[in-house]
């Protein structure tokens, strides 16, 4: 099915007479085929069923035993895989991206890697080196997929740090960073110098084996960033669990020291900020100001956050103070404050500040578009929007048709690797999947309209 771009939402610039809010009423579904809409409705309803999400891996194993690998794989490709994954081969990914680009949407490729701490195979240096090769290939593919006539800044990809370094090491580093006098050896500048020179750090807080792994990890991160810069691809670092966040922030800051110079067209490395954490607004403000004082460009992907339930259960088990917002409304207020902070910085500081509004929430998207208009931020400037492939199309398509820069997060890879990745993402994003009721209602409404032969 080839989608056709239609002028559904008027001109690509806000009216000079006043801000006109976008309509997220499902009108953009007119450009999609009936089979695509039916699949989307079925898959979203299945993913909103808690037992399927909770026991997804068991269901997958059961279906393979009962139906056989071939039939089970065919059903998955026609449903969950087909809805949320671009494909396995470069050609399949390219076909999916071309369909999105025809609708005004851009790709944000993601390599679906999952570390398994109890698996020797998936915590070995050989596994991290394989992931490095996959990340470098993703950089090449991201560059190749962007329209040759488009600006280089439009090429983005996701980077998961724990695909290149172990969670155990990040946990150890985070513990030292949080000690009052234990982090004097750990500075972004020192790590950045080690990345450039290749010299061993030999941190006293780590064992010989851990120091060797840290050096190899820094080398891998440096190679990805170096290759991405050469190919003009910006790296958006994924958020992960809070118990390793200090280490992730340190590693991102080290990459930023090396690669986020405004003179080189930075930021080339962006960090992700999760609004469901109580300290996010403060950290975002501090980091933005620190980057400004250091003369560095600053890139932010702003999300609500995907690990809320697990974070709360972990803090309860450890007897620690809950670091998360008390409810969804408080998270939304936090998101709104962080959004306002970044939009004002973009308005005041211009191109050195970049922001991705990564949200499926219609009110957050409306707030962003309205404030962009009020602050005079151009639609194709340093602010863009992001949603997951296969979800929130009524928002993504409306934004794309109106001329905003919109990216769809796109995992790709073989069925055997991607399905476990999708199931784990679904378990982390239960609230998002269960909250997609409005999208399901709009899909159902459009399908009934077609069934009854009504005009739009």
Image (tube, helix red, strand yellow):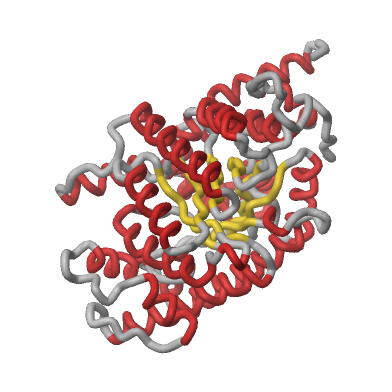
Q: Where is residue 191 drawn, in percent x and y? A: 39, 76
Looking at the figure, which quarter contains the N terminus?
Answer: top right
**Left or right, residue 243 beside residue 303:** left
The picture quadrant where one finds residue 240 is: bottom left
The answer to whether 130 is drawn above or below residue 263 in the figure is below
The quarter of the picture where the C terminus appears is: top right
Which residue occupies 54% across, 71% down? 131
Q: Say above or below: 28 vs 52.
A: above
Q: Is residue 328 left or right of residue 22?
A: left
Above or below, 455 relative to 73: above
Determine the residue positioned at 68% across, 22% down.
Answer: 26
Please name whichever residue, 78 or 418, is drawn nearer the observer in this view of the structure: 418
- Residue 370 is situated, as x and y percent measured from the top left of the image, at 58, 27
Q: Nearer the viewer, residue 101 or 285?
A: 285
Q: Who is closer to the viewer here, 381 or 53?
A: 381
Residue 310 at x, y percent in the picture = 32, 45
Q: Residue furthest bottom?
A: 199
Q: Is residue 75 visible?
A: no
* Label tally: 0
Q: Is residue 103 left or right of residue 166?
A: right
Give whichever of 339, 359 is nearer the camera.
Answer: 339
Residue 173 spot, x, y in % from top left: 29, 69
Q: Residue at x 63, y 73 (%)?
A: 227
């Amino acid at each position: 099915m080839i989608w056709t771009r239609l002028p559904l939402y008027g001109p690509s610039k806000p009216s000079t007479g006043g801000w006109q809010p976008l309509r997220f009423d499902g009108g953009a579904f007119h450009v999609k085929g009936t089979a695509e809409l039916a699949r989307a409705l079925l898959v979203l309803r299945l993913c909103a069923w808690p037992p399927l999400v909770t026991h997804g891996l068991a269901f997958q194993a059961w279906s393979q035993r009962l139906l056989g690998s071939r039939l089970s794989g065919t059903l998955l490709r026609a449903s969950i895989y087909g809805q949320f994954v671009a494909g396995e081969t470069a050609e399949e990914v390219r076909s999916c991206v071309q369909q999105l680009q025809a609708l005004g949407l851009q790709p944000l490729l993601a390599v679906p890697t999952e570390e398994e701490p109890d698996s020797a195979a998936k915590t070995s240096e050989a596994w991290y080196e394989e992931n490095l090769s996959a990340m470098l290939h993703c950089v090449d593919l991201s560059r190749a997929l962007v329209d040759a006539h488009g600006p280089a800044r439009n090429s983005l990809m996701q980077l998961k740090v724990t695909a290149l370094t172990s969670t155990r090491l990040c946990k150890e580093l985070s513990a030292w960073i949080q000690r009052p006098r234990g982090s004097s050896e750990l500075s972004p500048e020192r790590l950045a110098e080690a990345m450039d020179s290749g010299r061993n750090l030999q941190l006293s807080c780590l064992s010989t084996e851990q120091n060797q792994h840290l050096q190899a990890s820094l080398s891998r991160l440096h190679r990805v960033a170096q290759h991405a810069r050469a190919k003009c691809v910006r790296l958006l670092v994924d958020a992960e669990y809070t118990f390793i966040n200090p280490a992730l922030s340190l590693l991102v800051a080290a990459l930023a020291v090396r690669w986020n110079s405004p003179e080189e067209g930075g930021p080339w490395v962006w960090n992700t900020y999760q609004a469901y954490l109580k300290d996010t607004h403060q950290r975002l403000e501090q980091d933005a100001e620190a980057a400004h004082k250091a003369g560095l460009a600053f890139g932010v992907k702003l999300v609500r956050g995907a690990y809320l339930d697990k974070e709360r259960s972990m803090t309860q088990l450890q007897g620690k103070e809950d670091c998360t917002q008390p409810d969804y409304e408080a998270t939304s207020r936090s998101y709104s404050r962080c959004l306002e902070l970044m939009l004002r910085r973009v308005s005041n500081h211009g191109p050195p500040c970049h922001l991705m509004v990564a949200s499926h929430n219609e009110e957050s998207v409306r707030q962003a578009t309205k404030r962009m208009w009020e602050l005079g931020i151009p639609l194709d400037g340093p602010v863009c929007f992001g949603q997951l492939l296969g979800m929130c199309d009524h928002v993504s398509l409306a934004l794309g048709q109106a001329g905003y820069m919109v990216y769809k997060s796109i995992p790709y890879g073989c069925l055997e690797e991607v399905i476990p990745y999708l199931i784990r993402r679904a378990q982390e994003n239960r609230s998002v999947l269960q909250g997609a009721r409005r999208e399901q209602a709009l899909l159902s409404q459009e399908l009934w309209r077609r069934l009854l032969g009504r005009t739009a």
